[in-house]
Amino acid sequence: MKKPFAVAAALCALLLAACTAAPQKQTVSMFDLSEAMSAAHSGQTEMKLASSSDADPEGIFERFSDMDYGKVESFFLLYAADGAASTDEIAVIALRDAADAAEAAKSLERHVEKRRALYGTYAPELVPALDGAEVFTSAQYAVLIVSPNADAVRRAFEEFIAK
């Protein structure tokens, strides 16, 4: 008689835990998201795309984040084709666990600081664009936007992941 009760109690506990756990939303297509955000950037700067779909994704990722790549589900980086003329950059990191989003955002902030120091030595006129850099998180995403149309790029991100 005790065994069926124990099994029923265990099932109830399991169901309760499943109902209270916050589900992580499925990660969107990073390519499609990069297209939407690039369009909002408005083509003022020719941008190149690098992503987790490319050869050596971990090496690419290390160019703009120092976080453990094992925590990353996917990413993309849009960057100015002519880095000597523009600091424009858009990056989105989709994490395996949303709890790591704040850590990813901190890594993006460190990236911006390194770029400020670099541009400060050879192109100080471009540093103000980096001063306006936006770094934020949303669910399992960490986002970096350096764009003269940052508000439009952020809206494009928010609208895309809300779909």
Image (tube, rainbow, N blue to C red):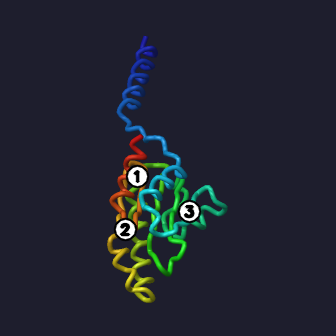
Assess whether mark 2 and mark 1 are in contact (beta carbons under 8 angstroms).
no
Q: Position of residue 142 (x, y in %)?
A: 41, 57
Residue sitting farthest toward the bottom: 121
Query: The residue under label 1 is which amino acid type?
Result: Phe
Dot in front, 1 or 2: 2
Instruction: Please give the label number shown on residue 49.
Output: 3
- Give coordinates of residue 69: x percent, y percent: 54, 60
- Nearest the viewer among 104 and 152 is 152
Q: Amino acid at mark 2?
A: Pro
Mark 2 vs mark 3: in front: 2
Label 2 to label 3: alpha-carbon separation: 18 Å
Give the quarter of the figure containing the C terminus.
top left
- Residue located 52% across and 66% down the image: 47
| Secondary structure of the residue carrying numbered label 1 | helix
Marking on residue 157 = 1
Residue 71 visible (yes or no): no
Secondary-structure class at tag 3: strand
Left or right placement of residue 56 versus residue 135 in this view: right
The residue drawn where x is 40% and y is 52% is 157
Question: Label 2: how many residues lie within 10 Å, few (<14), some (14-19) or many (20+)?
Answer: some
In this view, 163 is above or below 9:
below
